[in-house]
């Protein structure tokens, strides 16, 4: 039976990079059937919602989904972040952001870490209100024992599965004493179940500083939603930037893989969109499907192209999106 893969092209350069990844995946000896589903601002304009129920159903019925990018304009009545809503609706509780050195002048050597971010609660709970005639806005930060436990266990399990020996639990429990306090307490309760993994604590501001000073020290970082969003973007700048950063959104019953970059409207149709992050996201998807050999094959092909300068202009090359896609396919074959 072929793998059923839902493609979520979205807005801006999303359709271009997703089409590039589809072409690369089709060059591999993996049997896949691809379908497309609507998401983003374009879907909102056509259908009245940025995340149709049919899209959620398509993801649920597939083995995995590959997402491009969306535009999320502020202050439009009835519009919401389809990415946040998708994560919550499908309970994609774990956001995994690998950060690994590449053979490029913009990358520092010796970095190989995974940031594990809680993906469904925290300050992205969506519980907000305005009071005092619009003079005070309040967002509720929701941290639960269940949410903390499953993301912390995910981090320790991932460390064990990948041969890593330490996990940094990042919080701000000295100030956010109840919410981060609960997250920290759960970590302290779970850590003894993993005697082969060293648990280290770090305040989030210290972690931001240490990522700049010595990112090589980290192997796995686990943290709450907003902290993880910020720290993972910071970390990727040491290994080539957002153009090469990929992530996975993992739940018990669904998985969505994506480049981290946005929709980049100025690049639409110029041929300058960098497909590298989407290629790496596709490799993560293959790993999730237990197609480890083909995942490594794809990743090695992309990294070889980067090392040889067969890349798009943002990485210092001269290739178009389609040109880099064909270069990667040539390395695969």
Image: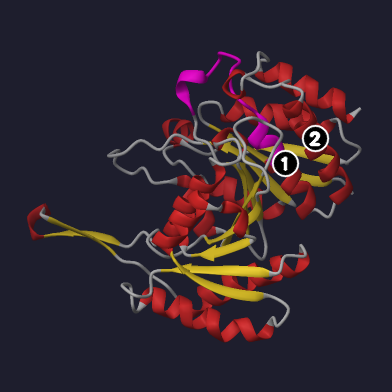
Residue at image point 55% right, 36% down: 241
126 or 197: nearer the eye? 197
Residue 157: in magenta span: no
Left or right: 28 as drawn, with respect to 190: right
Label 1 secondary element: helix
Left or right: 60 as drawn, with respect to 93: right
Is 301 rendered above or below residue 79?
above
| Residue pointed to by mark 1 | 282
Coordinates of residue 322 in the picture (x, y in percent): 70, 18
**Distance between the Cα atoms at labels 2 and 1?**
8 Å
What segment is highlighted magenta in the picture? 264-280
29 or 178: nearer the eye? 178
188 or 327: nearer the eye? 188
Q: Which mark is residue 25?
A: 2
Residue at image point 43% right, 36% down: 44
Coordinates of residue 63 in the picture (x, y in percent): 75, 52
Label 2 secondary element: helix
Disc 1 crowd rating (10 Å Cα; few below 14, some 14-19, many 20+) is many
Residue at image point 78% right, 39% down: 299
Residue 272: in magenta span: yes
Instruction: Please identify the quarter of the rendering in which residue 189 is found.
Output: bottom right
Coordinates of residue 239 in the picture (x, y in percent): 61, 40
Coordinates of residue 131 in the picture (x, y in percent): 13, 60
Is 137 rendered above or below residue 13?
below
Residue at image point 70% right, 40% down: 280
Which quadrant of the rendered structure holds the C terminus? top right
Left or right: 203 as drawn, with respect to 93: left
Furthest toward the front, the residue is 213
């Amino acid at each position: 039976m072929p793998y059923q893969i839902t493609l979520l092209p979205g807005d801006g350069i999303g359709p271009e990079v997703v089409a590039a990844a589809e072409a690369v995946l089709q060059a591999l000896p993996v049997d896949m059937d691809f379908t497309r589903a609507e998401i983003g601002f374009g879907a909102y304009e056509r259908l009245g919602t940025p995340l149709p129920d049919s899209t959620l159903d398509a993801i649920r019925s597939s083995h995995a989904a590959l997402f491009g990018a969306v535009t999320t304009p502020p202050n439009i009545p009835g519009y919401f972040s389809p990415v946040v809503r998708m994560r919550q609706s499908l309970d994609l509780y774990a956001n995994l952001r690998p950060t690994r050195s590449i053979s490029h002048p913009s990358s520092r050597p010796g970095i190989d870490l995974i940031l594990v971010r809680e993906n469904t609660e925290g300050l992205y709970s969506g519980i907000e209100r305005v009071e005092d005639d619009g003079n005070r806005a309040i967002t509720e930060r929701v941290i639960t024992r269940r949410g903390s436990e499953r993301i912390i266990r995910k981090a320790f399990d991932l460390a064990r599965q990948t041969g890593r020996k330490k996990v940094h639990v990042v919080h701000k429990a000295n100030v956010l004493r109840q919410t981060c306090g609960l997250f920290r307490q759960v970590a302290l309760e779970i850590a003894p179940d993993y005697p082969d993994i060293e648990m280290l604590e770090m305040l989030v501001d210290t972690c931001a500083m240490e990522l700049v000073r010595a990112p090589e020290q980290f192997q796995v970082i686990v943290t709450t939603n907003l902290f993880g969003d910020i720290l993972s973007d910071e970390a990727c700048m040491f290994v080539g930037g957002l153009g090469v950063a990929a992530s996975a959104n993992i739940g018990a019953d669904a998985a969505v893989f994506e480049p981290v970059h946005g929709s980049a409207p100025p690049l639409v149709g110029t041929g300058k969109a960098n497909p590298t992050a989407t290629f790496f996201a596709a490799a993560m998807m293959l790993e999730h499907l237990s197609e480890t050999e083909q995942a490594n094959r794809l990743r090695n092909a992309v990294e070889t192209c980067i090392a040889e300068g067969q890349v798009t202009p943002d990485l210092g090359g001269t290739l178009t999106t389609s040109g880099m896609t064909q270069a990667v396919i040539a390395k695969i074959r």
